[in-house]
Amino acid sequence: MQFSRQPQLLELMMDMLFRVSVADGVLSESEEQLIHSAARVFNFNDAEYSKLKSRYIKDFEKYYAILGCSGWY
């Protein structure tokens, strides 16, 4: 891949994909699948993908799990 030596450029591209996808306030399942597919093409591992995603989507479930409770009542 010609951009493999430019990780900052790949991260910027992923960042733009997330920004466009959440512009309407929601990251749909199909949008997330498309972005996750791009992450695999760009050789991002799951931790890198999650870090990028967390800039735009807050994962409150992990905090509820730490507390031993559910976020839905």
Image: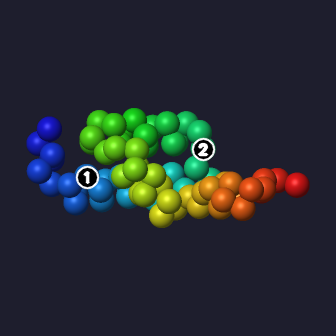
Badge 2 amino acid: Ser
Percent coordinates x, y for residue 53 in the rendering: 47, 55
Seen at 82% across and 53% down, the residue is 72
- Check residue 10 in the rendering and tell me which mark sits there, or answer none: 1
Seen at 27% across and 42% down, the residue is 42
Seen at 51% across and 51% down, the residue is 21
Q: Is residue 50 above or below residue 36?
A: below
The local crowd at label 1, few if under 14, some if 14 to 19, many if 20 or more residues have their Cα within 10 Å, is some
Which residue is more in the foreground, 66 or 56?
A: 66
Which residue is more in the foreground, 40 or 31?
A: 40
Percent coordinates x, y for residue 30 in the rendering: 55, 36
Whether residue 70 sits left or right of residue 8 in the image: it is right
Q: Is residue 36 above or below residue 27?
A: above
Seen at 60% across and 44% down, the residue is 28
Percent coordinates x, y for residue 26 in the rendering: 62, 53
Dot 1 lies on which element?
helix
Q: Quadrant of the C terminus?
A: bottom right
Q: Quadrant of the N terminus?
A: top left
Dot 2 lies on which element?
loop
**Residue 20 seen in the figure:** no
The residue wearing badge 2 is 28
